[in-house]
């Protein structure tokens, strides 16, 4: 169950179910977004439902981090935390897009990401990271 003000981020792991995913999202009262390692899935969801934000997951550091975002018509770059640095965040932000780090469980690195302006942190330690965000942003 999601908190009242929470967003639902849905990772789609298999192609061919995009229409079903969009159908379920459209009946939800929650704000929903989709992301996938298969960038074709993100693009297909965008084609089916332009109102649904999409993201792409990556485990590599692209030469041009904006290119795959543009190719998939994606808002969010879900980047593996060990492959994030300030130039990557700045480049993605300069194109009006967001960077979400996954899966960050290291407090020191999370603090660094926050000071760099990361847009979101995916973690196995939500209470710890929430407290860290609150103390860092204040």
Image (tube, rainbow, N blue to C red):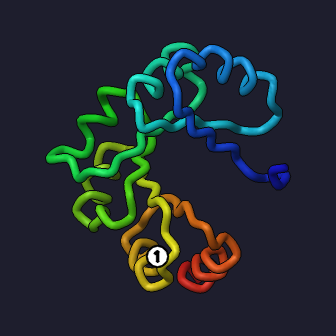
- Which residue occupies 18% across, 44% down? 64
Residue 116, horizontal then vertical, whole percent: 37, 71
65 left or right, relative to 69: left
**Residue closest to the eye, 106 or 66:** 106
Residue 106, horizontal then vertical, whole percent: 47, 79
- Which residue occupies 14% across, 47% down? 63
Residue 130, horizontal then vertical, whole percent: 65, 74
**Residue closest to the eye, 11 or 86:** 11
From the viewer's perspective, is residue 75 above or below residue 134?
above
100 left or right, relative to 8: left
Residue 96: image quadrant is: top left
Which residue is at the far left?
Answer: 63
- Which residue occupies 56% across, 14% down? 48
**Residue closest to the eye, 67 or 37:** 37
- How many marks the image carries: the answer is 1
> Badge 1, how many Cα within 10 Å: few under 14, some, many 20+?
many
Residue 98, horizontal then vertical, whole percent: 43, 50
Residue 73: image quadrant is: top left
**Quarter of the C terminus within the rendering:** bottom right
- Which residue occupies 57% across, 66% down? 123
From the viewer's perspective, is residue 49 above or below residue 76?
above
Badge 1 is on which residue?
A: 110
């Amino acid at each position: 169950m999601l908190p009242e003000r929470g967003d639902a981020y849905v990772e789609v792991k298999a192609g061919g179910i995009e229409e079903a995913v969009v159908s379920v999202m459209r009946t939800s009262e929650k704000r929903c977004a989709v992301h996938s390692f298969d960038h074709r899935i993100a693009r297909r969801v965008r084609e089916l439902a332009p109102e649904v934000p999409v993201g792409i997951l990556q485990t590599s550091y692209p030469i041009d981090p904006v290119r795959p975002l543009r190719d998939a018509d994606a808002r969010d770059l879900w980047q593996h935390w060990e492959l994030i640095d300030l130039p990557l965040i700045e480049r993605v932000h300069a194109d009006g897009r967001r960077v979400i780090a996954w899966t960050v469980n290291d407090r020191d690195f999370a603090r660094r990401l926050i000071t760099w302006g990361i847009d979101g942190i995916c973690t196995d330690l939500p209470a710890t990271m929430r407290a860290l965000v609150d103390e860092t942003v204040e």
